[in-house]
Image (cartoon, grey):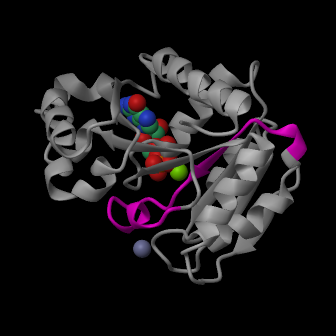
């Protein structure tokens, strides 16, 4: 499958995200923005979710990286439409780039688009991409103090995923500490403890996501 590559041009974010949200509401496509550190498991999680969801929903993926196309190749190998965004040094993506990429997909044949944001705990959370859902990933080896040190991503997440729970025996990581810190700054987040490696906890996240995708398809948006 051919991988399209788009270079990010920076533009004014405001209004563009609103436009994306309006157009995806009309098309009843759920846009899911996945954020977290480099190596936290964003690509692994997207691949695991594709496996769980592809029998039920039509999926596409936007891969955003500073350079390269490794993650896009991994998704494309699964037979899923993917566009690689190369930010040419920028450490986050902006709504303008998403607006340019959407017409490259067969939108009338999609239910959900995952965005793998640039690996970074900081500024991706500052940019509204017109998404319906934000999933923040923190992995066990990164340490359980990250919600306290990088609060914006945790405060704006709809779901917080603690990944690499298969590594818990080897680290002094307390999932409850991260969840408590997140709860203090975020009244809406739901929590998932899982391992993209072993698959433990993936069905629960997939079930929650299925509910949200179905809701978007039924209503064109969330109340
Ligand atoms: N032990 C373990 N390793 C994982 C898990 N999820 C991802 N990894 C590994 O962590 C590394 C980075 O994963 P990747 O999905 O590329 O992270 P990304 O940079 O956030 O997209 C890879 O070597 C994965 O195999 C997990 O749940 N447990
Ligand atoms: Mg990746
Ligand atoms: Zn940035």
User: Looking at the image, is 89 positioned above or below residue 38?
Assistant: below
Count of numbered marks? 0
- Taking depth in this image into account, of 198 and 174 the one nearest to the observer is 174
Percent x, y for residue 220? 70, 38
Please name the residue shown 51% across and 80% down the image.
89
Please name the residue shown 51% across and 22% down the image.
208
Farthest front residue?
223
Please name the residue shown 19% across and 50% down the image.
146
User: Looking at the image, is 145 positioned above or below residue 50?
Assistant: below
Taking the magenta stretch, the answer to whether it contains residue 220 is no
User: Looking at the image, is 198 positioned above or below residue 152?
Assistant: above
Taking the magenta stretch, the answer to whether it contains residue 112 is yes
Would you say residue 69 is visible in this rendering? no
Percent x, y for residue 172? 10, 33
- Taking depth in this image into account, of 55 and 214 the one nearest to the observer is 214
Percent x, y for residue 50? 66, 30
- Taking depth in this image into account, of 109 and 61 the one nearest to the observer is 109
User: Looking at the image, is 140 positioned above or below residue 7?
Assistant: above
Residue 108 appears in which quarter of the rendering? top right
Q: Which span is picked out in magenta?
A: 108-128
Percent x, y for residue 1? 88, 48
Would you say residue 187 is visible in this rendering? yes
């Amino acid at each position: 499958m051919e991988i399209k590559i788009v270079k990010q041009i920076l533009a004014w974010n405001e209004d563009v995200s609103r436009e994306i949200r309006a157009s995806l509401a009309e098309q009843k496509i759920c846009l899911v923005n996945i954020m977290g550190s480099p190596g936290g498991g964003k690509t692994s999680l997207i691949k695991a979710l594709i496996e769980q969801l592809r029998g039920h929903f039509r999926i596409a993926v936007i891969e955003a990286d500073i350079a390269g196309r490794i993650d896009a190749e991994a998704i494309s190998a699964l037979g899923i439409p993917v566009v690689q965004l190369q930010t040419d040094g920028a450490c986050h993506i902006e709504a303008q780039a998403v607006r340019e990429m959407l017409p490259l997909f067969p939108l009338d044949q999609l239910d959900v688009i995952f965005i793998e944001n640039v690996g970074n705990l900081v500024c991706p959370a500052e940019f509204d991409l017109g998404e319906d859902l934000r999933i923040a990933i923190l992995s066990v080896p990164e340490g359980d103090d990250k919600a306290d040190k990088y609060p914006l991503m945790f405060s704006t997440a709809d779901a917080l995923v603690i990944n690499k729970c298969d590594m818990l025996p080897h680290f002094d990581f307390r999932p409850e500490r991260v969840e408590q810190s997140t709860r203090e700054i975020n009244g809406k987040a739901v929590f998932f403890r899982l391992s993209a490696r072993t698959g433990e906890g993936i069905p629960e996240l997939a079930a929650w996501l299925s509910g949200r995708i179905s809701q978007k398809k039924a209503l064109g948006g969330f109340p």
